[in-house]
Image (cartoon, helix red, strand yellow):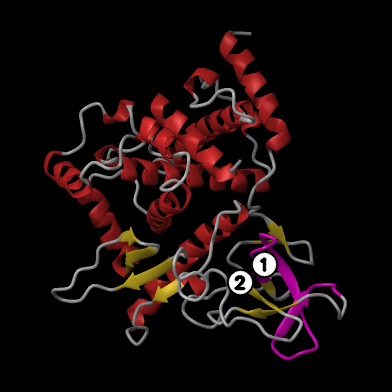
Amino acid sequence: MNRFETMSERLRAAWKPHKQPTAPRAYRCQCGRPVFFGNSRCLACGTALGYEPELARVLPLQPATHEGEWQLHGADAQAPRYRRCGNFDSPAGCNWLVPVDAQGHAPGLCRGCRLNRTIPDLSVPENGVLWGRIEAAKRRLVSQLIALDLPVQSKVDEDPQHGLAFDFLRALPGAPVTTGHADGVITLDVEEADDARREQLRTELREPYRTLLGHLRHEVGHYYWDRLIRHSPGLEDFRRLFGDERQDYAAALKANYEHGPPADWAQRFVTAYASCHPWEDWAETWAHYLHMVDTVDTALSFGIDADDVELNAEPWGPDALWRPEAPGAEAFLGFLNAWTELTAVLNEMSRSMGQPDFYPFVLPRPAVAKLQFIHLTVAGP
């Protein structure tokens, strides 16, 4: 047995106790058949389903005694009651549940939909289709943020100063929409939900990956930098790892678009765009962290374990970490190496179907240290 196999076994053993998904992605109806994250009804038996964000599960439902209210299947009359999100019958097709309080009151919208500040004009039929795709991606994002115990309060009606909100806007002649984040508001160009348009932009910008979920994870990374780093004791550590964010942001973006990334970006950053400014490096690395956690959560939920992957790859060791002495560092390395092996195989499976790589990126050593910094920031003290 070579040293790589020995190290890999040790890292996997450290990870084993932690191999429980943060946000499970595999669910079952009361009839025992599998159901999925976006389902509102079991196709096998017809049972109503709803996503309970606090429990992070799609659950079978039964009608409660009050019209329009639901309880979890098999519950007694005193059990908690729910209503459907107000966007259930809208083009958003939201299957999330809203809890009913002891006085019979409930918000009209679920935790995810309450984050919306602006939605597209639904009198334009195409906008409903595009908004539905955006909301499907946003629900995936928000469910993960809640499961990670990150602050998710609506800027619209919960926390105007520090909360989060989304503006989904459609460009008009002479009035383009720029996707981005400012002061807790994430703006997304609705045309990003048009597959042909998004692919055109991906090709023009020479990006290996461009999705709605990727956009949302990146932009919410900017929001959490403001919430978790800007005024925290971790700011100086951030600057040592990512660089000094006080450098001119507009000038950095202008230089990136005019001259492109530095020639050695692949040895230092998770993506080419991450190289243009420390804020973008954080947001890109944050998005990759969320990609990794959700993908591994999904794999574990369906019984796919990197321990079963036959791939003798050199694992990352403690010397690649930001803080190798931190609690859980060895488990984090196990997770990271499991991700590396899993995605290598998934890339090959994508190629076997004539599709682009599942994960078209290679993590350089500095990105591993940054990923651990984000992991420890999310985990908290």
Q: Is residue 146 magenta?
A: no
Left or right: residue 214 versus residue 112 is left
Mark 1: amino acid: Glu
Check disc 1: other Cα within 10 Å, few if <14, some if 14-19, many if 20+.
some
Callout 2 environment at 10 Å: few (<14), some (14 to 19), or many (20+)?
A: many
Residue 293 is drawn in which quadrant? top right
Contact (Cβ within 8 Å) of mark 1 with mark 2: yes
Could you tell me which secondary element the residue under label 2 belongs to?
A: loop
Residue at image mark 2: 96
- Check the image and name the residue furthest to the bottom: 67
Q: Which of the 4 image quarters holds residue 52? A: bottom right
Residue at horizontal 59 percent and vertical 58 percent from the top? 146
Q: Residue at x 27, y 51 (%)?
A: 202
In x, y percent, where is residue 6? Answer: 63, 13
1 and 265: which one is in front? Answer: 265
Q: Residue 249, image x and y in percent? A: 23, 47
| x and y, in percent, of residue 243 in the image | 32, 34
The segment highlighted magenta reads 50-75
Q: Residue at x 66, y 55 (%)?
A: 26
Inspect the magenta stretch and tell me whether residue 71 lies in it: yes
- Give whichever of 222, 345 is nearer the camera: 222
Q: Marks 1 and 2, how far apart in space?
A: 6 Å
Q: Which residue is mark 1?
A: 52
The quadrant of the rendering that contains the C terminus is: top right
- The answer to whether 221 appears left or right of 107 in the picture is left
